[in-house]
Image (tube, rainbow, N blue to C red):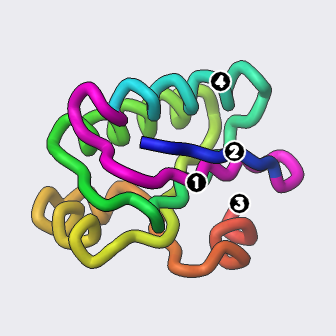
Amino acid sequence: MKSSIRDVGDIRVIELSGKITIGAGDVKIRELIDQALEDGKNDVILDLGGVTAIDSSGIGEMVACYTTVTKRGGHLKLMHLSPKITDILQVTQLITVFDVFDDEREALGSF
């Protein structure tokens, strides 16, 4: 999995691409979120537009990161979900947990 990070004001935008699977991307997401929090960025958007695959480990890590960010008083939101990831989140009913956006302007404006 590859990532790029940019800050828009107080919001950290993390763009992910590739696979978020056990051993490939799940640990990397945790590291990226921990770094955002260390940098004082409690509001985070995960841009999943380039993600080609995600497994239960990746989903579990996203939920764990959501909990970590929320406990710190921040927000973790998702953007640019593929139909496949949307389906997974709907089946697991996690779509009701995460705020999901198709447009970056809307996502940024939601904080």
Answer whether labels 2 and 1 touch (C-beta < 8 Å). yes
Q: Tell me if 104 is positioned left or right of 68 in this view.
A: right
Give the residue pinned by disc 4: 35
What residue do we see at 21% from left, 31% from top? 22
Mark 2 lies on a secondary structure that is: strand
Answer whether labels 2 and 3 touch (C-beta < 8 Å). no
Task: Find the distance from the CA under tag 2 to the CA under tag 3.
Answer: 18 Å
Upstream in sequence: badge 2 or badge 1: 2
Residue 66: % across, % down: 44, 39
The amino acid sitting under disc 3 is Phe
Upstream in sequence: badge 1 or badge 3: 1
Give the residue pinned by disc 1: 15
Q: Looking at this view, is 19 or 59 the one in front? A: 19
Number of residues whose C-alpha sits closer than 10 Å to that of mark 3, classed few (under 14), some (14–19) or many (20 or more): few
Number of residues whose C-alpha sits closer than 10 Å to that of mark 2, classed few (under 14), some (14–19) or many (20 or more): few
What residue do we see at 64% from left, 46% from top? 4
Mark 4 lies on a secondary structure that is: helix
Q: Quadrant of the N terminus?
A: top left
Main SS of the magenta part reads strand
Upstream in sequence: badge 4 or badge 2: 2
What residue do we see at 76% from left, 48% from top? 6
Mark 3 lies on a secondary structure that is: loop
Query: In the rendering, which numbered label is found on residue 111?
Result: 3
Task: Find the distance from the CA under tag 1 to the CA under tag 3.
Answer: 18 Å
Q: Quadrant of the C terminus?
A: bottom right
Give the residue pinned by disc 2: 5
Q: Tell me if 53 is positioned left or right of 82 in this view.
A: left
The residue range painted magenta reads: 8-25
